[in-house]
Image: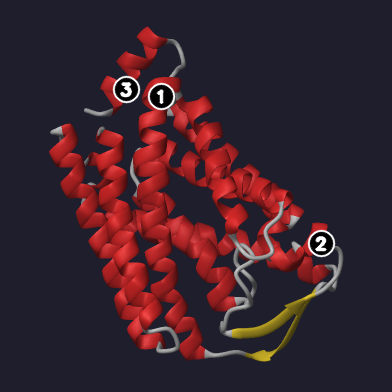
Amino acid sequence: MKVVWQLLAVAAAAFVGQLAVSAVDGNPWLTLTLGGLTAVLAVLAYRWVVRKTEHRPVTELAGPGAGLALGRGMVIGLALFGLVIANIALLGDYDVRGWGSVPGAVGQIGFMAAAAVTEELLFRGILFRFAEKWAGTWLALVLTGVLFGLMHLFNPHASLWGALAIAIEAGGLLTAAYVATRKLWLPIGLHFGWNFAAAGIFGAEVSGNGTPQGLLDAVTSGPSIITGGDFGPEGSLYSVLFCVLAASAFLWVGRRRGRLVPRRRAERADAVTTLSR
């Protein structure tokens, strides 16, 4: 029931925030404000429900170092997506037609902040954390990654390949970032940086949700395996490649720090107890 109550609390905050953001669609400044408030509300809901159900300090959202971790995550997310676009552009499949919309990019900040925070709280903060206690790090990473990918099958222009790509990229990379730090701030920043780079800077589709208004007015053309087609660059092999490399680096760091939870029951119990201190 702990999982159920935590999911309900964060999902309720996300739902209310989504309704508010949808109600002001077309007004970038209100979208920025309400998106930011949704992110804050979701964090507060998570802190409250975890304390109530688990009776422990919410160390995964500890305040000290939060700003630095968020900033690092944003830089990594921006850099990774920038590498994807750069490689697509080198093949002549990404064309900038001119400047896009500054207000549009401002609105994307709020929208992507709300999405990044609520999704990380739900998938890494709740689902992965509880699955890891039961199955260990590796199996929990696979299971929650697949679930995250399947969720994107409901998006416009979705496909099995797109869902698989998301499962590998986001499910693997963001979970690995959490494992390496045992904090949610880095994956939140990374998630936001990646999505904002796509929609707010490069004007690319995000998971098949249509072409947004970003700083650049650009189009992609060419083989879907390179550009991601209608699903957007997240369906590109370049995205899969760079995210796998980054996830491998985070998992290596997590292993060096002794933060991988083993699968065997006795060892798993000891590891989870140690990490929660």
Disc 3 marks which amino acid?
Answer: Val
Q: Secondary structure at mark 2?
A: helix
Q: Secondary structure at mark 1?
A: loop
Q: What is the quadrant of the C terminus in the image?
A: top left
- Of 142 and 271, nearer the camera is 142
- CB atoms of marks 2 and 3 within 8 Å: no
Q: Residue 222 appears at what percent x and percent y?
A: 86, 69
Q: Of the residues tagged 2 and 1, which is closer to the observer?
A: 2
Which of the two labelled residues, at mark 3 and mark 1, occupies the earlier sequence position? Answer: 1
Disc 2 marks which amino acid?
Answer: Ser
Residue 60 seen in this snapshot: no
Q: What is the quadrant of the N terminus in the image?
A: top left
Task: Give the number of callouts.
Answer: 3
Which of the two labelled residues, at mark 2 and mark 3, occupies the earlier sequence position? Answer: 2
Q: Quick one: which residue is furthest to the top in this view?
A: 266
Q: Quadrant of residue 254?
A: top left
Q: Residue 43 appears at what percent x and percent y?
A: 25, 56
Q: Which mark is residue 258?
A: 1
- CB atoms of marks 2 and 1 within 8 Å: no
- Of 122 and 181, nearer the camera is 122
Q: Of the residues tagged 2 and 3, which is closer to the observer?
A: 2
- Of 14 and 94, nearer the camera is 14
Q: Residue 40 appears at what percent x and percent y?
A: 25, 63
Q: Residues within 10 Å of mark 3 (few under 14, many from 20)?
A: some
Q: Residue at x 59, y 46 (%)?
A: 150
> Which residue is tagged 3?
272
Locate residue 273 relative to residue 188 in the image: left or right. left
